[in-house]
Image: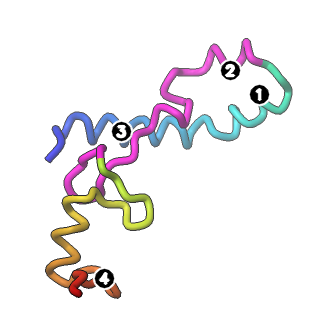
């Protein structure tokens, strides 16, 4: 499990991105890069990190299921994900 501080930091960044999204779009459309530079660093969506919804792990993240590979495997084995079964041949 990821440190709670990292998870909370990412949530705070997401709020900042949402807050400044319209202003960023307006500044980019006008080509005002000096104005963009004056916005907070966390206002850029590039600074957000994809994290597992359950554990907070950032590596091995699957966008389709929004969980890490380890959580996906565990959930698939217990039948928590519809349509996913263990391969056997």
CA distance separating discs 2 and 1? 6 Å
Instruction: Name the residue that disc number 2 marks.
Output: 36
**Left-right relation of 85 to 35:** left
Gap between marks 4 and 3, in whole Å? Answer: 30 Å
Magenta stretch: includes residue 30? no
Of the residues under marks 3 and 1, which one precedes in the sequence? 3
The residue identified by callout 4 is 84
Among numbered discs 2 and 3, the one appearing first in the sequence: 3
How far is the residue under mark 4 from the one under mark 2? 44 Å
Query: Along the polypeptide, which appears first: circle 4 or circle 2?
Result: 2
Whichever of callouts 2 and 1 sits on the residue coming sooner in the sequence is 1
Residues packed near mark 2 inside 10 Å, few (<14), some (14 to 19) or many (20 plus): some
Q: Which residues are magenta?
A: 33-59
The earlier-in-sequence mark between 4 and 1 is: 1
| Quarter of the image where one finds residue 24 | top right
Q: Which residue is mark 1?
A: 27
Which sits earlier in the primary sequence, circle 4 or circle 3? 3
Determine whether the residue tagged by mark 3 lies in a helix, strand or loop. helix
Labels 4 & 2 near each other (Cβ < 8 A):
no
Residue tagged 3: 10
Rendering coords of residue 38 (x, y %): 63, 14
């Amino acid at each position: 499990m990821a440190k709670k501080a990292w998870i909370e930091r990412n949530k705070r960044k997401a709020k900042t991105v949402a807050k400044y999204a319209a202003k960023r779009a307006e500044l980019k459309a006008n080509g005002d890069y000096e104005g963009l530079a004056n916005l907070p660093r966390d206002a850029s969506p590039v600074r957000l990190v994809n994290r597992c919804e359950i554990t907070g792990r950032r590596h091995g993240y699957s966008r389709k299921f929004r969980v890490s590979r380890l959580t996906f495997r565990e959930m698939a084995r217990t039948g928590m994900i519809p349509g996913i079964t263990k391969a056997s041949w």
